[in-house]
Amino acid sequence: MLAAPLTVYANDTTDTTDSSDTTDATGNQTENQPKQSIAITQSTPIVTSKSGYHVTAVISNTDSTATSSGTLHLTTNTLFTFVSRTDIQNWAENNAPIPTPNELGSVDVPSIPAGGTATVTIEVNANQQTLASIGSWGPKPLMLSYIVGNQILADLPSFLTRSSDGLNTATTPAMNLTVAMPYTASGWQVDNKAISNRIAETTTSSTSTSSKSNSTDKADKSDNADAGNAAKATDTQAISLSEQDADTARSLGQTFAKHRSLQVIADPLYWRQSAVQPSIAGIMQPADFDITAYTALGDTAAYEKAGITTEQWNAKQAAAWYAAGNDSETPSAYAWQGNNCWTLDALTAAREQGYDTVIADASFDADQTEAVHTGTYVVDTSAGDVTVLKEQSTLGTLAKGQATSTDAQAESSDAGRLARLVAQSAFYQMEQPYTSRYLLMTFSRTTEAGWIDQVMSAFEQASWLNLTDLKTMAEADPYNVSDSVNPDKADDANTANTRSALRQLADSRHDIMRMATSILKNEIDSDEVSSLPPQALARQDANDTVSHSNDPTQWIGSLLVLHDDMALRSMSGSPQPTATRKAMVRAAKTLASDLLNGVRINPSESISVFSESAKMPITVSNDLPYAVSVQVNSLTDSMQIVTSRTTDIDIPAHSDAQVTFTIRVSTSGSSTAHVSLSDREGNSFGNTQDTAITSVMRVSDASGFIIIGFAVLLCIIGLWRQFHRKKDPDE
């Protein structure tokens, strides 16, 4: 067995090229900060009897001077076994006094220029003495040491995990692990042209991308399905996946096909509209609606005013969406955790809406135990029992691409995190090898396909793991049955941002309803709109347009469906505020403003007044497909030049109409008439048009000339008397 070379750490010497005194963000001196660092870019996640070991590392030099040529050593401790979670975490943070005397290999490192890097690889053959001498399976400490001369300029602790393959050791039962991922969109986009077409009630052409065309075909096919009639349809031409999301769906679909044990929980809206529809283990809330934020806000009315009702995101609706685009049996429904903790109120709301099983992160239970345990809980709520599948904290953190701590430097790279993830899972099995446990690990909503492939490929090779499905885990004996929950962190919802978004959505929806109740000539009651079938409203094809050309009820209903679809997508469980939330709220506001701006005042020329009164014609255009009845208002900024105030006007569809205001003046001068529109309730909307008015008073009849002539005569007589009067002798 080879021994590691005797070395001295740089901070044990006075060599200033390897370390320096620096100042941290608080202004305190921090001594001996390393100027060189190591990062693992590739490594063998599981070592078998024939695999050997491979590691590729990047050595960085942040010093102002180049390093001398050196060596990267790879060492381990073949006899060491981790006995506690504290030991394994301390080793990851380079804070455990564990010797690694057994060398696996080394490689020469050339001189690294200032600010430069060097990439090196160590290949360890399966027959190498140290590697072949490992006699027990499980995680072993692994150390990478960058040595120049006799100084260690940088070191990096990691893990080498040996499987039981080829070892004469007792076989123990594999630990049950369920790996799940939400399949949902991170970016929806809105086609403003499609919104304009919807307002104008013109036929839109089919969309250009394959994902949109695919979803449109499925929507047409679903019209005859019972489930499709129940589903609240989305205008697939107005709301679609972003190009990035469409590409992501294709990449994920290929990865899902390779790893059938991965439990994919699909957002049915995303699943239907994506070009790739992989096999799934379950469905989740439509549009990934955040139930935890919904209950944390505690304001159901705010959601309803914004156009979001429970009928849009409950389990029945999710099943209807899935069934409308698929002939197979509808899978189980799971509620995926959003931005907040699963509180008792949140679990109750989920159960009321048909979700009897929820996916929770590690925040669900604040209790810490000596060893990991089954993550299945049962909570008794007023709406019924809810099964909670809680994620194991450390595995979940690593799976989501995060380091377990800032000091765990090896976990700053995918390869380093994978080595820790595999080692941690093996350690958990070794904690209680004969105890049956069911653990859950989840990927995030935005985890990339490449990382999923690496993790699942490693886990599928792990002899100590039995990859199970969510249904099996949900049916396992629960770790805890209770009528309360004990989250380990306070509810940290960004309620201010959510309230702001809901308020803006409520305003835009209110504007659409104003059009229906107070602007359209054929007034519509809100109850009439809500009674219409949303599936037909969302399609709005040419036949629909002809069939209700004189009745705006379905037209308004289709606009509300489009608005509410945007609102639903803005309340997803992704960390907020997301680009999707901003885009959906902005698009909803655009929909409402474009609708109201369909009735507008045309610009008019300035008016000159040469008498006490005149007429001011105003033309109002209606670009909408239905007649409107509104008020036109005029107000001047002068008391001497005024106009009549308000005039009612009816404007047919796609037409202009003119209204005339009376101008009255009492003196010469100028003023501006501010002309605006208001609905029948007197609330203003649309654009404002300013018209300049100039008054030039002049004599307009014979009596005026007589009066002026008499005044001139009196003036002449007065002047004559002034110059011809006799002075008084006393003056």
Image (cartoon, rainbow, N blue to C red):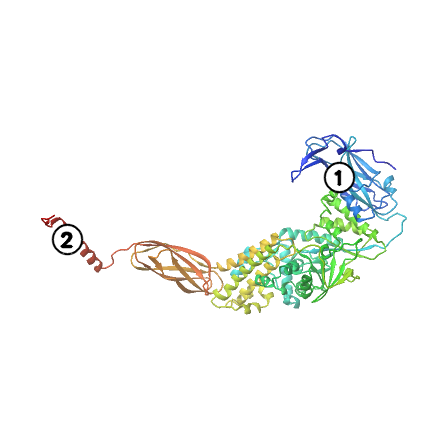
The percent coordinates of residue 96 (x first, y second) are 79, 42
Task: Give the CA distance from mark 1 to mark 2.
Answer: 115 Å
Q: Secondary structure at mark 2?
A: helix
Q: State whether residue 619 is above or below residue 95.
A: below
Residue toward you, 96 or 142: 96
The percent coordinates of residue 419 (x first, y second) are 78, 46
What amino acid type should be assigned to the residue bearing mark 2? Ile
Q: Are marks 1 and 2 in contact (CB under 8 Å)?
A: no
Per the image, the residue denoted by label 2 is 717
- Among the 4 quarters of the image, the one containing residue 544: bottom right
Q: State whether residue 546 is above or below residue 711.
A: below
Which quarter of the rendered picture does the N terminus lie within? top right
What amino acid type should be assigned to the residue bearing mark 1? Ala
- Among the 4 quarters of the image, the one containing residue 306: bottom right
Identify the residue at horizontal 58%, vertical 65% (top origin).
537
The percent coordinates of residue 549 (x first, y second) are 51, 67
Q: Secondary structure at mark 1?
A: strand
Horizontal side of 643 relative to 119 (left or right) equals: left
Few, some or many residues within 10 Å of mark 2 (<14, 14–19, 20+): few
Q: Which mark is residue 57?
A: 1
Q: State whether residue 702 is above or below residue 64.
A: below
Residue 719 seen anywhere in this rendered image of the structure: yes
Q: Which mark is residue 637?
A: none
